[in-house]
Image (cartoon, rainbow, N blue to C red):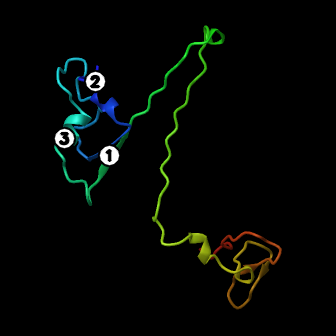
Amino acid sequence: MLNRAGFLNNHLWVTPLHEREIYPAGEYPASNLVKPGLPTWTEQNRDIEKKDVVLWYVAGVTHVVRPEEWPVMAPHYVKFSLMPYGFFSQNPTVTMPKKEDKIVSGPKTDPATGIALDQSADCVTPAKGTN
């Protein structure tokens, strides 16, 4: 099976973007006799630095059948999350305005700046007409 589904050998693959590389097992996995797809593409050791890449994530679920699932089986979920590291140089909320500088949509407006002020608000939102 791994000759035709070699992509199962790893959970994560990264390849440079190529318009013909669509399916992880290659174009015709049922008729291929050698390892097509991701194993062949990654063996080429193509450069991915400063290029558009494709991240291939392989997840499998082993399902143990239970009598309670007949005739309707409950769904199984697989989740994958990407969390950035170092995307920002600091937390973007650090540069939020101070409480006394808040721009809020409210009834009071500072005549000098035209910014709506409301000391009771705990959120920062642009006043109408200030964006």
Q: Are marks 1 and 2 in contact (CB under 8 Å)?
A: no
Q: CA distance from mark 1 to mark 2?
A: 22 Å
Q: Residue 33, position in %: x, y?
A: 17, 20
Q: Are marks 3 and 2 in contact (CB under 8 Å)?
A: no
Pointer 2 residue: 2
Nearer to me, 81 or 103: 81
Q: Which circle marks residue 3 in the picture?
A: none
Q: Amino acid at mark 2?
A: Leu
Q: CA distance from mark 3 to mark 1?
A: 15 Å
Screen quadrant of the N terminus: top left
Instruction: Judge whether 104 appears above or below 48 on screen.
Output: below
Total marks drawn? 3
Pointer 1 residue: 54
Q: Residue 79, position in %: x, y?
A: 52, 38
Q: CA distance from mark 3 to mark 2?
A: 16 Å
Q: Residue 50, position in %: x, y?
A: 27, 60
Pointer 3 residue: 43
Q: Quadrant of residue 66?
A: top right
Please tell me whether mark 3 sits on a helix, a strand or a loop. helix
Residue at the farthest bottom position: 112
Instruction: Judge whether 87 appears above or below 94 on screen.
Output: above
Looking at the image, tell me whether mark 3 or mark 1 is earlier in sequence order.
3
Judge the density around disc 2: few (<14), some (14-19), many (≥20) Cα neighbours within 10 Å.
few
Q: Residue visible at 66% across and 11% down?
A: 68
Q: Residue visible at 66% across and 72% down?
A: 126
Please tell me whether mark 2 sits on a helix, a strand or a loop. loop
Looking at the image, tell me whether mark 1 or mark 2 is earlier in sequence order.
2
Nearer to me, 75 or 117: 75
Screen quadrant of the C terminus: bottom right
Observer-side mark, 3 or 1, equals: 3
Judge the density around disc 1: few (<14), some (14-19), many (≥20) Cα neighbours within 10 Å.
some
Please tell me whether mark 1 sits on a helix, a strand or a loop. strand
